[in-house]
Image (cartoon, rainbow, N blue to C red):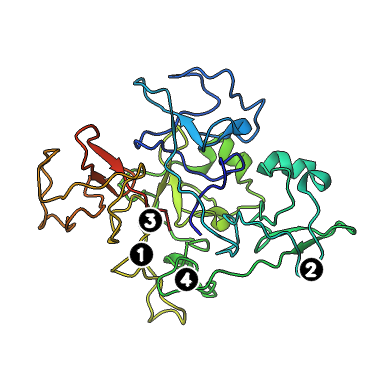
Amino acid sequence: CPECFNGNGADYRGSASFSNDGTVCQMWNQQSPHAHSDTSPDTYPELVENYCRNPGGLMKQPYCYRNSNNDPDKMYCDIPRCGKCDCFNGRGVLYNGTINTVISLSPCENWRGVYKAMIEAAGLSTHNYCRNPNPSVRAGPWCYARGDQTWQYCSVPRCPTKEGEIFAIPPCNTQDCLSCLQGNGRLYRGDVKQSANGNACLPWSTHQSSQSLFPQSEYPELQENFCRNPGGQTVLPWCYTNTNMWKSYCELPHCSDDSLHTIPYTIPIENVDCFIGEGLGYTGEVSVTLSGRNCQQWSVKSPHTHRYIVSGSGIELNGAICRNPSPYGKRKGPWCFVDDIEVRWEYCNIPRC
């Protein structure tokens, strides 16, 4: 399932860090450029780094303060609502369904009643739904069984795999596999150390919060400034590229069929209605923005003029379909010009893979 939120997103603990207009979010522990005394990490421990949150559940969905001097000071984030999602991919880090029984069919204990420390560290709400707050240790959603309070894996099925699905790849079991990309790159141990947009990666040890989030004892793979996917928590290996703790995905060589006896990692060329990274390779059919507005045809210059070339630029801009023809780093996902004179462009209503 893609990273998404339920209800008003008060229990959202993902890593989205961009507002709906594509602006990077301000760090919660900073009061500049926008002061926000009512939302302090001391009061709401879930306010880590610059990740989108809904502290106290006071807003309609997760939001953040924009790292920009321009108004508005805060804005909702670019995160889709969840559909029915009672299955899990990978290690179940993003699982946020409502199954609350273990494989022995015993009901789960409420998280707050059995593990206060984990509640505070992982931001688990006062419920008894299966979760996996420590993917470096456990391989799927779990909980403490009611009564004996021992942990057990839950009766959450894996999501059906399809050709090209991110987590349809068996684990690596050869040294060759570690120097190329398979699946979400959790086992990648190569030496690439720059992001897909060409920025040099910073050493993992540069960031104090990185050391607390990914202690060396649990994540020994975080050496120097190499691209990694600690815990398999994101769709691709990544690294920090500046001191503001911005994550950037890396472009890595894919594992070949010749060297590995595994299913190759591929994304179908057609009809992919989710996107990876900045969505430069998105070729799906969505033509509606996050606010529900229709996209303007790329071939016309009304109501908004632009200089994008419909074909011959490397990305085919057909019809009114969402794309990201922008240079690396300028926009963070598929978008389109809006068929509304009042709004020039918006990101599209497409989830991340």
Tag 4 secondary structure: helix
For the residues labelled 1 and 4, say whether their Cβ atoms are less than 8 Å apart: no
Identify which residue, 164 or 257, lies in the foreground: 164
Mark closest to the chain's N terminus, 4 or 2: 2
Q: Amino acid at mark 4?
A: Cys
* Above or below: residue 147 compared with residue 43: below
For the residues labelled 3 and 4, say whether their Cβ atoms are less than 8 Å apart: no
Q: Residues within 10 Å of mark 4 (few under 14, many from 20)?
A: many
Provide the residue designation for mark 1.
253
Q: Amino acid at mark 1?
A: Pro
Tag 3 secondary structure: loop
Identify which residue, 235 or 345, lies in the foreground: 345
Provide the residue designation for mark 2.
105
Q: Please report the residue visible at 41 percent of the width from the left and 38 percent of the height from the top.
A: 18
- If the image is split into quadrants, where does the C terminus sit? bottom left
Q: Choose top left, top right, bottom left or bottom right for residue 76.
A: top left
Q: Residues within 10 Å of mark 3 (few under 14, many from 20)?
A: some
Provide the residue designation for mark 3.
276
Identify which residue, 315 or 288, lies in the foreground: 288
Mark closest to the chain's N terminus, 3 or 2: 2
Q: Amino acid at mark 2?
A: Leu
Residue 327 visible? The answer is no
Q: Amino acid at mark 3?
A: Ile
Q: Choose top left, top right, bottom left or bottom right for residue 72.
A: top left
Q: Residues within 10 Å of mark 2 (few under 14, many from 20)?
A: few
The answer to whether 293 appears left or right of 208 in the picture is left
Q: CA distance from mark 3 to mark 2?
A: 36 Å
Q: Position of residue 323 (x, y in %)?
A: 25, 52
Tag 1 secondary structure: loop
Q: Position of residue 80 (x, y in %)?
A: 45, 48
Provide the residue designation for mark 4.
177
Q: Please report the residue visible at 51 percent of the width from the left and 56 percent of the height from the top.
A: 83
